[in-house]
Amino acid sequence: MDDFRARVRAALRERHMSLRGVARALNYDVAYLSRVLNGKQSPSLQLAEGLDGLLGTDGELVALAARSDRSAEMDALEHSPASDACGGEGFTRAIRDMSQRLVALDNEMNGLPVADAAARAYKSVHRQMGEGIHDRKAEHEIQAAAAELAEVAGWALFDAEKHQAARRFNQEALYLARLAGDRSIELLVLQNMAMQAGWVGRPREELAIARSIIEQGRISPHTEAMFRVREAKGLAGAGQGSEAARSFDRARSLIQESKKGSDPHWTWWVTANEIDGHQGFALQEAGQWKNGIPYLQRALHQPGGAKVGYRNISAVRLLGCLLGVGAWPEAEELALSIIPTIGETASARALKLLGDTAQRGLSLPRAPMGVRDALHGCYEALAEDPYAF
């Protein structure tokens, strides 16, 4: 990582660019960029790609970041962060590196199952935090890094359909973020808590969390867009469809306004595709299948969408809409395209949703044989040995 930092600093000097200017140009949080260049956090490949384009380094930074990532990856995943001789700064860096690698694995291909690894890593950090003694500044940095790791574990447990455990880790992450004064991670955790509330059938709780943040104001456009999506989902779940549509529209306008680099680095996934997917979800859940289809199609097929491990959820939601309106050829084609990805999908939410959708489709008396065969194929793939290939 030293080579990466040195090359970035040299390129900045050559082009007379400031870190704040880079943050504005690439739409990153300047604090995140500062942590990377000071060696407190590893660079993501997404950041390296952006810097290569901005600084004209012709892929050099991506190569350096990838080399650093490969050299540290096995250590980061095989060993939990340790509060060792490196002191508070080393412990903080190890925790942040672990969080980054877990997120990368969660988003690779169709996602890798990271919930148990994330939970174990946080438990190790939690134990060491209780035993170690650090100065006040180091303590706040450790708490902030631990909050981020607990947030990653909470998200992964949610995606694994382990909702009670996810709620515990979210509460822990929220506590640590507030203790450390890390408003950015606090907002991310609250977003996750709102999302989980909506997923488990508590739309009014989702709406209440979202509005509590929106009404406070003083948040960046992408952050507000994220909570507008949660507001919209809560409204839709409460049966207020027209108000939900307005909130979705407001979320889209906010991401178009976001040009100043003031957004937290973790808002990278708040894109037009993501908003389309959520609006499609809301319409499908409301039984408005015909209206939901174009949103879900855009979420699946538009270029430029964020790379996330739960991407199959949009495909499954679209399948549900196609079955609902009796678009049999399209439903059959989509079901057949989903089957090869099932064995590679780690998201328990996506797999459970697919099983429920296939069951509903098979109960439709008008479904033709080709559709039934494709849905049976989905069932068979879900039941296969996950370790067979």
Image: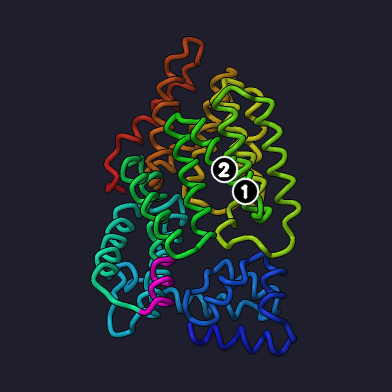
Residue 98 in view in this figure: yes
- Give the labeled residue for mark 2: 212
Q: Residues within 10 Å of mark 2 (few under 14, many from 20)?
A: few
Residue that appears at 68% across and 53% down: 221
The foreground one among 134 and 355 is: 134
Main SS, magenta residues: helix
Mark sitting on residue 216? 1
Q: Is residue 196 left or right of residue 123?
A: right
Q: Nearer the viewer, residue 260 or 10?
A: 260
Circles 1, 2 touching at the beta carbon (< 8 Å): yes
- The residue lying at 36 percent from left, 36 percent from top is 381
Magenta-colored span: 135-145
Q: Colour scheme in the image? A: rainbow
- Residue closest to the eye, 17 or 214: 214
Q: Which mark is residue 6?
A: none
Q: Estimate the spatial distance between the alpha carbons at disc 1 and disc 2, rounded to whole Å.
A: 7 Å
- Count of numbered marks: 2
Q: Describe the element under mark 1 as helix, strand or loop.
A: loop
Residue 248 x %, y %: 67, 37
Kindly identify the amino acid type of the residue bearing the numbered disc 2.
Ser
Dividing the picture into quarters, in which one does residue 52 lie? Answer: bottom right
